Image (cartoon, rainbow, N blue to C red):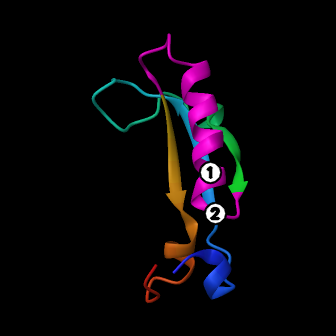
Amino acid sequence: MSETQTGKQLLHLVFGGELESPEGLTFRDLNQLDIVGIYPNYAEAEKAWKSKAQATVDNAHMRYFIVHMHRLLDPDATA
């Protein structure tokens, strides 16, 4: 079911930063994390993620992520 069918917001967080290693998931400096924003659905979050990822493509250590906040807020729900 889509968000419009369920009437629920399916919040997604987009953030990123520079990693210590391109193969890892440890950030170099947590104070330098780029919190892009919170979006009402995956499609909007993916647009923001793609824009940031493409803007930083020349830095192999930069990574951006999409976090499914709705899964953290309501872990028992199926989405």
User: Which of 54 and 14 lies nearest the eye of the viewer?
Assistant: 54
Instruction: Give me the residue at 53% from left, 84% from top.
Output: 74
Which residue in the rendered view is the most extreme toward the top? 58
Instruction: Give me the residue at 69% from left, 85% from top.
Output: 7
User: Residue under circle 1?
Assistant: 45
The x, y position of residue 48, in whole percent, is 65, 41
User: Which of 34 and 79 lies nearest the eye of the viewer?
Assistant: 79
Provide the secondary structure element on which disc 1 rests.
helix
Provide the secondary structure element on which disc 2 rests.
loop
Disc 2 and disc 1 in contact, CB within 8 angstroms: yes
| Relative vertical location of residue 69 with respect to residue 30 in this rendering, above or below | below
The amino acid marked with disc number 1 is Ala
Instruction: Give me the residue at 64% from left, 35% from top.
Output: 31
Q: Is residue 16 magenta?
A: no
Instruction: Give me the residue at 57% from left, 76% from top.
Output: 2
User: Residue under circle 2?
Assistant: 41
The x, y position of residue 59, in whole percent, is 49, 13
Give the residues in magenta. Answer: 39-62
The x, y position of residue 45, in whole percent, is 62, 51
User: Which of 41 and 71 lies nearest the eye of the viewer?
Assistant: 41
The amino acid marked with disc number 2 is Asn
The x, y position of residue 1, in whole percent, is 51, 81
User: Which of 46 and 76 lies nearest the eye of the viewer?
Assistant: 46
Is residue 40 rendered to the left or right of residue 12? right
